[in-house]
Amino acid sequence: MSRNHKDKYENSNPRRTHTFMSTEDANSGKKSYWPELEITGSIRNLSPNLWQLTHLTALYLNDNSLQRIPSEIGRLVNLRALDLSSNKLRSLPAELGDLIYLRELLLNQNYLRVLPYELGKLFQLQVLGLQGNPLSKEILALYGEPSGTHKLLSYMLDNLQVAGGSGFVKRTPPERTITWLLGR
């Protein structure tokens, strides 16, 4: 059936409405520009080509079976929204901290026990979803406070600076005095 209008697909999430190009537009050679991409459906692996879509402003990878997100996600520097909810993630790459324009980061319903300190660099983040993760009591307490997202990000940034950017706290061993025992 030929249509002169664009077809709309309304997702169960009311904030996401997708418009598809009509057949006539595609046949006439019209190019499409996708600032947002949604990939769902129990996906286990992502194509390396995904990380070349640097124009994306929103990426929805929720409701899959992803066990890891590669460090190449840091290439998607224009992202404003990232949804990784309802996957099987146990850790996150430090490169998430490179997504400095991110305003919404949804990590709900995963297996995250720790978060990379680099998340503290996300100064524009307004929405952080962490529900349903076995995070430490300290992180959950900060997150649960009024202005919890801001407090948690400040905590992460402070620890990043202490850690020297590695995500792990570097501790200098204490100075020791060496006493030589000489036998007589």
Image: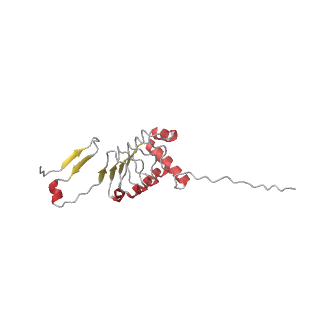
Residue at the image point whose x is 47% and y is 45% from the top: 152
Q: Position of residue 67 (x, y in %)?
A: 42, 47
Q: Is residue 94 visible?
A: yes
Residue at the image point whose x is 67% and y is 52% from the top: 174
Quadrant of the image containing the C terminus: bottom right
The quadrant holding residue 28 is: bottom left
Q: Position of residue 29 (x, y in %)?
A: 18, 61
Q: Is residue 70 left or right of residue 31?
A: right
Count of picture labels: 0
Q: Foreground residue, 68 or 136?
A: 68
Q: Foreground residue, 173 or 42?
A: 42
Q: Is residue 79 left or right of residue 23?
A: right
| Residue that extends furthest to the bottom in the rendered view of this protein | 29
| Residue that extends furthest to the right in the rendered view of this protein | 184
Structure colour scheme: secondary structure
Residue at the image point whose x is 14% and y is 56% from the top: 24
Residue at the image point whose x is 30% and y is 51% from the top: 37
Q: Is residue 145 visible?
A: no
Image height of 71 relative to 40, above or below: below
Q: Foreground residue, 157 or 2?
A: 2
Q: Is residue 125 left or right of residue 14?
A: right
The quadrant holding residue 98 is: bottom left
Q: Position of residue 142 (x, y in %)?
A: 48, 41
Q: Position of residue 167 (x, y in %)?
A: 51, 52
